[in-house]
């Protein structure tokens, strides 16, 4: 849960809109009056948090962004950035028509920063499951060491004749990850380029380095 708090610090932790903090003085942070604060305070529905719950201060200007292709799923032509906190949408790249991603994970014990397996974002690794708050999902999140992206871009110029293949494949080096698609007659009159990039998840890497 993400909520907005005020700057006031109180000692009364019994009120509905308070969550006991983890400091040595047992102080609480008031959550009333914030634009993004639910009326019931910090609680997942009607269920209270356990004594193991932690409160993280994200600062006065946290960022929570979602990247996707638009303007519609059926006709993507640009990369868009969605601000999950205020709902604003910003176009940050034209000519992008396909974006695929897989996770590089490490489940060894003790954990290391080496990617031992690539997994598709499905099943236990899809976004809805990773964010369900379960212990299993927490362990899966901690196992993610990198994200591998595959991007297909398209030229702005429409050619008179077909200049591109009638199909494409992302992650074609691994049959378990491969994603394939086809192009219509109209789409084949554009030129395409395909790129791949592996991005380390640095926050997770730092945790492992501190343990070692």
Image: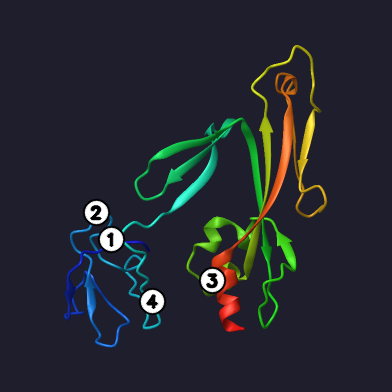
Residue that carries the numbered disc 4 in the rendered image = 54
Distance CA(mark 1)–CA(mark 2): 7 Å
At label 1, counting other C-alpha atoms closer than 10 Å, the crowd grade (few under 14, some 14-19, many 20 or more) is: some
Residue 181: x percent and y percent? 74, 36
Pointer 3 and pointer 4: residues touching (CB < 8 Å)?
no
Distance CA(mark 2)–CA(mark 3): 28 Å
Distance CA(mark 4)–CA(mark 1): 16 Å
The kind of secondary structure element at disc 3 is: helix
Distance CA(mark 4)–CA(mark 2): 22 Å
177 horizontally vs 35: left or right: right
Q: Nearer the viewer, mark 2 or mark 3?
A: 2
Q: Quadrant of residue 168?
A: top right
Q: Nearer the viewer, mark 3 or mark 1?
A: 1
Q: Quadrant of residue 54?
A: bottom left
Q: Residue at x 30, y 83 (%)?
A: 23
Pointer 4 and pointer 1: residues touching (CB < 8 Å)?
no
Pointer 1 and pointer 2: residues touching (CB < 8 Å)?
yes
Q: Earlier in the sequence, mark 3 or mark 1?
A: 1
Q: Residue at x 75, y 69 (%)?
A: 116
204 horizontally vs 23: left or right: right
Residue that carries the numbered disc 3 in the rendered image = 138
Residue 103: x percent and y percent? 66, 59
């Amino acid at each position: 849960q993400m909520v907005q708090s005020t700057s006031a610090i109180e000692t009364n932790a019994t009120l509905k809109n308070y969550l006991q903090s983890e400091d040595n003085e047992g102080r609480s942070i008031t959550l009333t009056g914030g634009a993004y604060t639910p009326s019931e305070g910090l609680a997942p529905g009607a269920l209270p948090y356990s004594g193991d719950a932690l409160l993280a201060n994200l600062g006065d200007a946290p960022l929570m962004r979602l990247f996707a292709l638009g303007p519609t799923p059926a006709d993507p032509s640009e990369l868009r950035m969605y601000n999950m906190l205020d709902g604003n949408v910003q176009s940050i790249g034209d000519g992008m028509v396909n974006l695929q991603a897989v996770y590089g994970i490490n489940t060894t014990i003790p954990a290391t920063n080496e990617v031992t397996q690539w997994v598709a974002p499905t099943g236990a690794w899809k976004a809805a499951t990773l964010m369900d708050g379960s212990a299993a999902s927490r362990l899966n999140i901690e196992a993610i060491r990198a994200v591998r992206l595959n991007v297909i871009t398209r030229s702005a110029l429409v050619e008179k004749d077909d200049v591109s293949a009638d199909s494409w494949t992302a992650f074609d080096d691994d049959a378990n990850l491969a994603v394939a698609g086809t192009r219509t007659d109209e789409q084949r009159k554009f030129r395409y380029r395909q790129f791949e990039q592996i991005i380390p998840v640095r926050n997770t890497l730092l945790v492992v380095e501190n343990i070692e």
